[in-house]
Amino acid sequence: MLAERVREKLEATEPVTVKKMFGGLVFMAQGNTVAGVVGDELFVRVAPEDAVEALARPGARPFEVKGRVSKGWLLVAGEALDDDVLDDWLHLGWEAAAELPPK
C-alpha cells in the first residue's frame, strides 16, 4: 500500500504527523505537509523553482481540488512510483516543506 511505503520512507528521516485530509492521508513535518496519498496516487509539495521540471517527470500532473489547480503541489500516478522514484519525490517534498517556517 502506497501510504505505508510513504510513512516508512518519511519516518526514516524524521518523525512525521499523519492526518486525514483530501480524502486520503497527509504526512507532515513541523506542521507543514510534505506529501500525501489519495487512493493509489501521491501528491507532493513542490517548491516554485522546481515545479516546471517536476511536472515533466513521468506520471506527474497538476494537483487539482474542486477544479482548481493548487500551486506548489503535484499529483503523481501510483504506477510511476517504484522505490527509487518515490524516494526522489519524497525528497523533493521534504525540501519544499523544510523551506517553510514551522507551524
Image: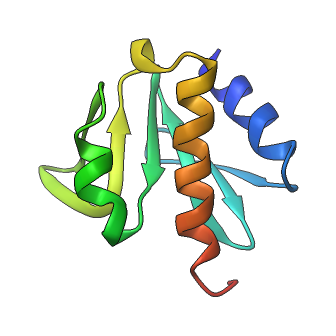
Query: The N terminus is located in which quarter?
Result: top right
| Residue 36 in the figure: left or right of residue 39 | right
| Residue 94 in the figure: left or right of residue 10 | left
How many marks do you count on the picture?
0
> Residue 87 location in percent, x, y?
63, 34
Foreground: 59 or 30?
59
Please name the residue shown 41% across and 59% down the image: 46
Please name the residue shown 59% across and 44% down the image: 90
Q: Is residue 28 above or below residue 30?
A: above
Please name the residue shown 50% across and 20% down the image: 81
Q: Is residue 98 above or below residue 101?
A: above
Which scheme is used to colour this image of the protein? Answer: rainbow
Q: Is residue 52 above or below residue 75?
A: below
Q: Decide if residue 25 is in sight here.
A: no
> Residue 57 location in percent, x, y?
30, 34
Foreground: 66 or 17?
17
Q: What is the quadrant of residue 25 in the picture?
A: top right
> Residue 58 location in percent, x, y?
29, 25
Q: Decide if residue 57 is in sight here.
A: yes
Q: Is residue 28 above or below residue 6?
A: below
| Residue 47 in the figure: left or right of residue 58 | right
Q: What is the quadrant of residue 56 in the picture?
A: top left
Q: Residue furthest left?
A: 67
Query: The C terminus is located in which quarter?
Result: bottom right
